Image (cartoon, rainbow, N blue to C red):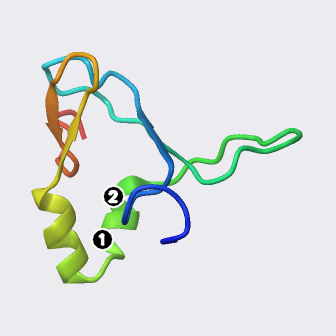
Amino acid sequence: DRSHGILGVGPQWHNDGSFNDDVFSHSGYHIIRVAEHGGGTHFTHQGAAFDALPEEYQERWSRLVSVNSNSGVLHPMVHTHPIS
């Protein structure tokens, strides 16, 4: 939604373990609007979500990296975890 947040991303992202250099089990959180009451957590299969994207979006996301704002560590936005 272009009226909220960073172009193509949204206002808030959180990624557990992004300060570590090594590959970790990713958990990505995208906050669009903070709930005023309650607001349970929902989970989705990120691989299935990626596979459902059109090929041009998959190619774009495959070129992107996340940058930890404190440590400067870079991680690819799309990768296969070695245990999966």
Q: How many marks?
A: 2
What residue is pinned by disc 1? 51
- Residue 13 is labelled as none
Q: At numbered mark 1, what does the secondary structure look like: helix, strand or loop?
A: helix
Residue at the (78%, 45%) spot, across then down: 35
Q: At numbered mark 2, what does the secondary structure look like: helix, strand or loop?
A: helix
Residue at the (16%, 36%) spot, across then down: 75
Residue 81 percent across, percent down from the top left:
20, 39
Residue 45 percent across, percent down from the top left:
44, 54
Marks 1/2: CA–CA distance:
6 Å
Q: Amino acid at mark 1?
A: Asp
Question: Above or below — where is 38 with respect to 17?
Answer: below
Label 2 Cα neighbours within 10 Å, binned few <14 / some 14-19 / many ≥20? few
Q: Residue furthest front?
A: 3
Residue 46 percent across, percent down from the top left:
39, 54
Q: Residue furthest right?
A: 37
As drawn, is 35 to the left or to the right of 76?
right
Residue at the (39%, 26%) spot, across then down: 16
As drawn, is 16 to the left or to the right of 38?
left
Question: Above or below — where is 10 with respect to 74?
Answer: below
Question: Above or below — where is 42 with respect to 82?
Answer: below
Q: Amino acid at mark 2?
A: Gly
* Residue 8: quadrant of the picture: bottom left
Residue 36 percent across, percent down from the top left:
85, 42
Label 1 Cα neighbours within 10 Å, binned few <14 / some 14-19 / many ≥20? few
Q: Quadrant of the C terminus?
A: top left
- Residues marked 1 and 2 touching at CB (< 8 Å): yes
What residue is pinned by disc 2? 47
